[in-house]
Amino acid sequence: MNSLMHLLQFTDSAFPVGTFSFSNGLETAAHMGIVHDADTLEQYARSVSLQAAYSDGVASLMAHRAASTKDYDSIVKIDHEIMLFKMNDEARLMLKRMGKKLAELGTKLFPDDDLFRRWLEDIDAGKTPGSYPVAQGIAFALAGLDEKSLYASHQYGVINMVLSAALRCVRVSHYDTQKILFKLSEETMTHFKRASEMTFDDMNSFVPEMDIFASLHERGMMRMFMN
Amino acid sequence: MKAVNRQYSDSPEVNFDSMPEMAPYLQQPDAMYVGCPGKHGYLNLGFVLDKSGKSILRELDRRAPLIVQQELYFDEELPEMPCVYILSSGGPNVDGDRYAQNFRVGAGAMAFISTGAATKLAEMKRNYSGMMQNIVLEENAYLEYLPEPIIPCRHTRFICNTTMTVHPSATVFYSEIYMGGRKYYGNGELFEYDILSVCTRGKRPDGSDLFREKFIIDPHRSHIRDIGIIHGYDVFANVIVMTPEESAKQIYEATEPFIDRERRLAAGITHLPGGAGLLFKVLGMEPGPVKALVREFCSRVRMAVKGKPVPPEFPWR
């Protein structure tokens, strides 16, 4: 019961890590008229989910394993590895902002455990980047939640971030976004099976058009969102 | 990584059998076996400054089917730069090919490397074609790697791992252009290959890691035509520029990302992690305009680093 409640809390869009500030390139795609209705939004949300599934998702699972065995050195290594993989400034900024927020919150939620406190000190000292997938891995391990719950929550967060942004910049209704979320959620378990067997060497992502949207956003005038 | 039960006994130095994405493609080819002579080539090129301060190709070691003939000095803007074209005497890459390419540019030297024609990746039935590349640039070295496009066919399986070890003062321009397939063959063949797996790592000479980009394109499994991935485009170019921060800043500012929906052409630029340099991506419909954008971008890089533009492409290329 406790763990189910914790899962809901960590996955809730009101969980204060700042997801509302980011659109993952959707703002540009919408501005260009490329994402303009439910069908195009579904495609875009699926691409965002796919991108996270085999990169950030893998890092969060690896961090969960490291945190479960209190292997702090591995946590720092995973934190560095995921940042080496982030190919644009806004993506790196998003990961670090949300990671640090969750680390700060983590020290309050788990006051008796040293892991988050030590990691936060190292983030502040510039010794580790403090990425969000790693923070999630630690939080789920400390709350006694399993890998499957972590992965589901991670992917849910990514998809929901785009869909919430869509309500503010694409002509879609709540019905549309909920239908998309429901559908993409059903595809998540296939990703989990593959992602749970991956290591650093296997992390991959292929979203060239999204990368171009991100590049335009980095230079762009439309700045409702931070990415 | 999981151990894979190998189904053939020869063991070339270039081996990707343990990569999970290659697991379905590990049978012995029906024709020549994996790693047999002619399917297991390498190319070692070493460029250095000679005593008079001229860049020369001092080291050239090769095994069939990869060939480089002597260096030429045909670049009108940088006549002191040795230029070489890589050829493959075997024709397209086939089932079970394993290639290695090692390029080294010594301190202060420069070089231009391209291919004589597009690299064709043939249809594969049992195995895959793999390539390992090591690129090393010493202090103040400069390399332009600007090959012709890569054309995968139906059921191509190709994996390429590249490691670039670059001194903080050096510049490497590394480009790859991937066609969606033999677009005008028969009724058209686009994204019918089985898999392309491409990984590029950037490092410093002290061993520190700067970035790692890996993409796996498996058109039969993923929604490749979705918005955000390849969408409606047919050609994709990926360009990595490792260069000192000052030139990176200049190149970034001179490069405008765009999406031209009429010409169906788009390009984006971003900073690599670790202050390593820049990443430039292009999407388009035909190789011509994509090649032109990549070359234009190379010219901007050369201008920032060497103060000279890239001359216009030869009319027959």
Image (cartoon, coloured by chain):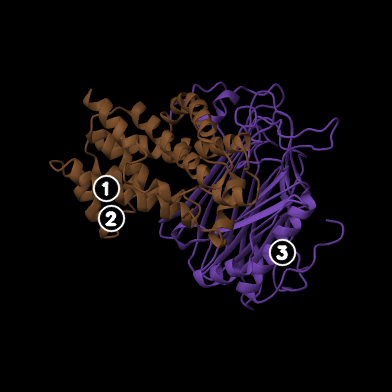
Chain colours: A brown, B purple
Label 2: how many Cα within 10 Å (few below 14, some 14–19, many 20+): some
Q: Is residue B111 something that shows in the picture?
A: yes
Residue B254 lies, with reference to residue B35, above or below; the image says: below
What residue lies at 20% left-to-right and 46% top-to-bottom?
A: A107
Disc 3 designates what residue? B296
Callouts 3 and 2 in the same chain: no
Label 1, secondary structure: give it.
helix
Using the image, tell me which numbered label, if any, was put on residue A103.
1
Front residue (pair B202, B254): B254
- CB under 8 Å between callouts 2 and 1? yes
Residue B216 found in image quarter: top right
Q: Inspect the image, locate mark 3, and give the three-letter code of the amino acid beneath it.
A: Glu
- CB under 8 Å between callouts 3 and 2? no
Subunit of label 1:
A
Quadrant (top left/top right/bottom left/bottom right) for the C terminus of chain B: bottom right
| Coordinates of residue B182 in the picture (x, y in percent) | 79, 37
Front residue (pair A37, A192): A37
The label nearer to you, 1 versus 3, is 1
Q: Residue furthest bottom?
A: B52
Residue B230 found in image quarter: top right
Subunit of label 3:
B
The label nearer to you, 2 versus 1, is 1
Disc 2 designates what residue? A123
Subunit of label 2:
A
The label nearer to you, 3 versus 2, is 2
Quadrant (top left/top right/bottom left/bottom right) for the N terminus of chain B: top left
Residue B221 found in image quarter: top right
Q: Inspect the image, locate mark 1, and give the three-letter code of the amino acid beneath it.
A: Ala
